[in-house]
Amino acid sequence: MTLIRRWIARPVHWLPKFDPHSLQIRLTVGMALVSALGIGTLAIATSWQMQRQLVATHKQTIKYIFDRFDRDVMHYSERNPAEKGLQPAIDSLSADRVLLWVKRPDGAIAAQSMPLSGRDDDTSKGLLGLPARQMMPQVSEIGGRFWVWCSGPLTVKGTHLGQLYIAADITEDRGILEGLIRTLALASGAAIVAMTVAIALYVRRSLRPVLEIGQLADRISVRELDTARIQLQNAPSEVRQLAQTCNTMLDRLAQSWEQQRQFVSNVSHELRTPLTLVSGYLQSTLRRATNLSEPQREALEIAASEAERTIQLLQDLLDLARADRGYLHFQLEPLLIVDLVAEVVEMAKQYSHREIAIVCGEDLLEASADRNRLKQVLLNLIDNAVKYSPSDTEIKVGVRSFGDRAIVEICDRGVGIPLAQQGRIFERFYRVDEARSRSVSPGESLATGGTGLGLSIVKTLVEGMGGTVTVRSKPGEGSTFGVILQRD
Ligand code: ADP
């Protein structure tokens, strides 16, 4: 019982997500509607035609009887007055479901079929009360039964005998016909359902290659731009053409991405050397010159700090370009995380003059990482915590383990990052708020306004070491960045 209940309650993964705007649903609904309309029209036309045929057959029968009635009266009356032949003629032409009667001009019944005579039920009353019509067979419901009937004047041997009525009971035939129509309606409904299912499967199958193209385009990252190409088997030629076009586009994208990477790498390389020289000269001038006026010293300090910032930017760009090309190598080794964190925090305290506390429960926690790269990562994150939090607030660096992972968390009580931007801060050159982030006051040295590359370098380096970076943040309350590494 519990097994059955569990089976019913299990999540159904094979059901596609219902999206009323998807091409698949639109095509399925459109094609199903057209086929339902076709099948429905055919079924309605067939039943109408069958009904018409039934009535036409009966109309023909009563017309035939009507046409031969005067001859039969003549035959049965011989030398007697024509009225004498009425009853025998009616008796000979009456049948189970065919009734005849003649009304005199004064309205009295001159002769009638046996089932009518002497009866006083609704059917007899209804039939005998029918109005006179000039030979126009029609269908009427009388006494709960269906009749095809007609009437016309009867003249035999030059004597007008009155009005002849003929009525055929078609209730049974109609019943059979209605049964047939019901079966036809059921068969049509079943055909429409079967056709809709078949159409849905066919449309889904036909659109699968298009979905595959979309999924692949969604998955391709910069790293796979060179290799990822769409390969489709047994796809319709239009879709193959689309895949071909996408592949050509990917070729061009890969080519221009490579050119751009090359360009950035070359420019960074070419600019870094002279800038390092300029920075060196500026630093030594600042150190040695004794006769500088205050404005001159200030201008030189700004120039030195901007040169330093630009060198850092070029170094970051070179690192990212190398990482993109897979040229960034990591020397992974088991590291005592707490020792490394203490070293980094000491360095950060010196340049930031901020209170940075280490919170650690496991002194001997080891993780596999590249010493210098991990230092660079932690310095970057602490640098951000310093930049984006008020100087009188504390920064905490926590070290803990979680299963087979070691986690280093850098926590500040600063401005925080809105949820909508938390996914984007790891993008290159993305900065939450230019005005908020950038600061150019010379006194802040390394902690001056960043470039928007810091977190993308952090992400690239941590992922290169087989780890991940996380962020939890609330505007106005602070942020916590986590570096998760494999324990050794
Ligand atoms: P930047 O050089 O501007 O610091 P990053 O890539 O290091 O560039 O960071 C990207 C953006 O993320 C920053 O501009 C800043 O808006 C936001 N950010 C990063 N760290 C923090 C933090 N600790 N607190 C608040 N915002 C942060």
Image (spheres, helix red, strand yellow):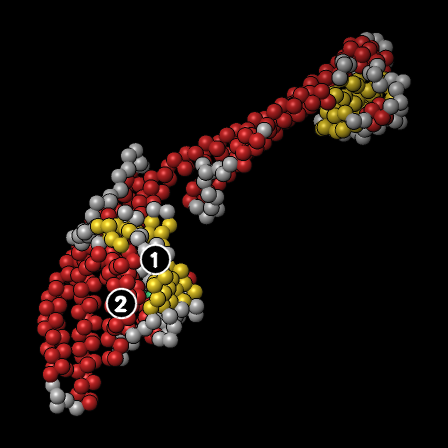
Q: Which residue is mark 2?
A: 346
Residue at 52% in and 32% down: 7
Residue 270: image location, x then y, percent: 10, 66
Which quadrant of the rendered structure holds the N terminus? Answer: top right
Looking at numbered disc 1 in the image, what kind of residue is underneath it? Val
The three-letter amino acid code for the residue at tag 2 is Glu
Whether residue 196 is situated above or below residue 414 in the rendered picture = above
At horizontal 54% and vertical 34% (from top left) the residue drawn is 6
Residue underneath mark 1? 399
Give the structural element (helix, strand or loop) at label 1. Answer: strand
Q: Position of residue 115 (x, y in %)?
A: 83, 16
- Give the secondary structure at mark 2: helix
Q: Tell me if residue 187 can be seen.
A: yes
Mark 2 near ligand 1 (CB under 8 Å)?
no
Return the disc, 2 or 1, that comes first in the chain's sequence. Answer: 2
Q: Quadrant of residue 286?
A: bottom left
Q: Residues within 10 Å of mark 1 (few under 14, many from 20)?
A: many
Please report the residue visible at 46 percent of the width from the left and 43 percent of the height from the top: 17
Residue projecting furthest to the front: 363
The alpha-carbon separation of the residues under discs 2 and 1 comes to 16 Å
Q: Is residue 95 left or right of residue 103?
A: left
Nearest the viewer among 100 and 215 is 215
Is the residue marked by circle 2 packed among few (<14), some (14-19), or many (20+) residues within 10 Å?
Answer: few
Residue 218 horizontal/vertical position (percent):
33, 49
Q: Residue at x 36, y 52 (%)?
A: 401
Using the image, tell me which numbered label, if any, was put on residue 461.
none
Q: Is residue 108 above or below residue 206?
A: above
From the viewer's perspective, is 54 left or right of 70?
Answer: left
